[in-house]
Image: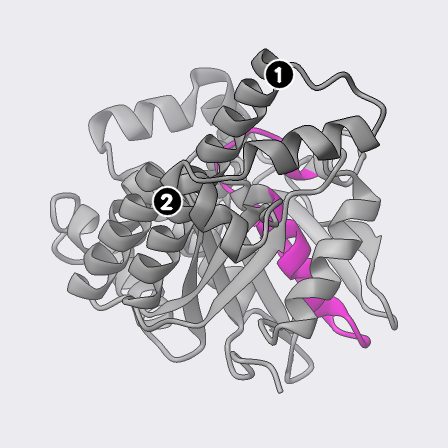
Amino acid sequence: MADFPDVRLHVVSGKGGTGKTTVAAALALALASGGRRVLLLEVEGRQGIAQLFDTPPLPYEERKVATAPGGGDVYALAVDPEEALLDYLHMFYRLSPNGVAARALRRAGAIDFATTIAPGMRDVLLTGKMKEAAVRSKDGRHVYDAVVVDAPPTGRVARFLNISEEVSGLAKVGPIKNQSEGVMAVLRSPQTRVHLVTLLEEMPVQETVDAVAELEAIRLPVGGVVVNMVRTPLLSPAHLAAASAGTLDRSAVSAGLSTAGVKADDALVGVLLAEAADHASRVALEERGRDALAGLQRPSYELPLLAEAVDLGGLYELSTMLREQGMA
């Protein structure tokens, strides 16, 4: 059984370089498997989703980008803050998105104006679109079975999601205030989880630990931790211990080189022993990272470092692993 059966809004964050966009895309595919309909949202304007799915840059409309194993569809949307602002004005003030006023706002750079006079407005608009997609229904049923958000990095994800704090400086009453309260009600509800992506390296692990504390402090529900780009140790535990202690058998290394048809001089053996010691140190660092993440007491999932750059085939492979480990 999946670890988050009742969650409909999956927010994915991680330190830059940890592969959070890749994990978000793989999670969307995993959730769509078996006939479900999933929306994958991008909020940073990088068009990373389009690159992963090898499609043209995403417009401000929901477009199908993949079919999941066993049926099911993944749709994607790159949220444009200016279009989200016009959506907001249409929703609350009946301003037609194609009317004269809307065209004038576009020409005048509406979003630049809005975010200059109210710096928190951009995040209000982006999170508002997340919430709208998650709760949207038609004929009494949700349009999407799940929504996955490729969110900002861990360094600012808590601030991005904590729009109640942002809005406190913008409005005390009125539609913006009501909108933010509605968004926060969804973000803090059992149907939402914030998942964190990390590597088994010191800084990403520490940022993950810090992000969990920040999210918990503002009462946002933390989901799982995805450890990405995991490498399998090249040596056995006994050999790792020996390499770390500097007690690997030089004669055995030399004999192995000779068996492989390589001339085993002292210099080459010394280089290999040094490489083994470095590898043992890295494995020990990774284990300390695992211990720190285990202390968070959150569901944990591991994805391997793929031999090639992640393409569409790699996404399907990673999505299968997430399903097998119970994330979706």
Depth check, mark 2 against mark 1: the one in front is 1
Left or right of residue 211, residue 189 in this image: right
Instruction: Farthest residue to the front: give it.
Output: 251
Residue 274 percent across, percent down from the top left: 48, 25
Q: Is residue 19 placed above or below 72 in the rendered structure? A: above
The kind of secondary structure element at disc 1 is helix
Colour pattern:
one colour
Of residues 12 and 264, which is closer to you in this image? 264
Of residues 270 and 308, which is closer to you in this image? 270
Residue 2 percent across, percent down from the top left: 60, 81
Q: Is residue 171 placed above or below 131 in the rendered structure? A: above
Point 49% across, 47% down: residue: 240
Let me know if residue 234 is in the magenta part: no
Of residues 281 and 179, which is closer to you in this image? 281
Q: Which residues are magenta?
A: 22-49
The circle drawn on residue 268 is 1
Residue identifier under label 2: 285
The quarter holding residue 30 reads: bottom right
